[in-house]
Image (tube, grey):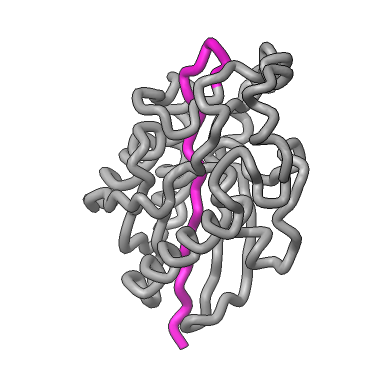
Amino acid sequence: MPRTLVHLVRHGEVHNPAGVLYGRAPGYYLSERGAAMAERVAEVFTDQSADVASVTASPLLRAQQTAAPLAQAYDLPIHTDVRVIEARNHFEGLALSSNPNMLLNPRHWPYLLNPFRPSWGEPYTSQVRRMIAAIRDARSGAVGREAVIVAHQLPIWLTRLHLEGRRKIHDPRKRECGLASMTTLTFNGATLVDLTYSEPAADLVDPTKLSVGA
């Protein structure tokens, strides 16, 4: 059976001096450091002479910018897929990292009642369902080669938990899905046979900054 790789790449660092939970809000672009991360991701593939057949990205600007150097390196178009977009979130637009007391406002309380769904945004099961569908299509379109999907932290992490048979409820601080990281799925035919994780741009991450949004 042909061996096919699907790489789930999280976008690079975003310019976000206010520390806003940006979610799906438009206009959030890569910082200079984030652009360097995107270049690093492209270098990883070209240095390994990876046989990249397709580059897919979330419609959000930060994902498109992260995908651009890789697509250019392989002379491929960026396929925009809304199924790999960031999750909806009631708290989008709030600077919770700098002012968590915002959650004390009673209007937010109904959205904090059920962390298992979660009640503040798109259900975990919905995120996994759309990501799995996008992965399946990417694999089918790159049989025997490699496909890259540039997406966001939470959908990628939930997909990994699902594939590894772990519970989707989790501590966000313990997600193994750093900026410009790669979660690589190896398929033998249609069967997932391996899952690996790497952080090619780890040395570029600013440890003094919180990763707000995804």
Say which of 107 and 134 sits in front.
107
**Closest to the observer, 145 or 133:** 133
Vertical placement of residue 108 versus 180, above or below? above
Residue in front for this viewpoint, 139 or 82: 82
Residue 62, compared with residue 99, is above or below; it is below
Span highlighted in magenta in the image: 1-20
Residue 68 magenta-drawn? no
Q: Residue at x 24, y 52 (%)?
A: 76
Residue 149 located left or right of residue 155: left
Q: Residue at x 63, y 71 (%)?
A: 194
Look at 72% across and 51% down and name the residue there: 116
Q: Position of residue 159 (x, y in %)?
A: 59, 58
Q: Position of residue 1 (x, y in %)?
A: 47, 88
Question: Magenta segment, principal secondary structure?
Answer: loop
Measured from the top left, where is residue 56 in percent x and y?
A: 34, 53
Q: Is residue 126 above or below residue 113?
A: below
Q: Confirm whether the magenta stretch covers residue 12.
A: yes
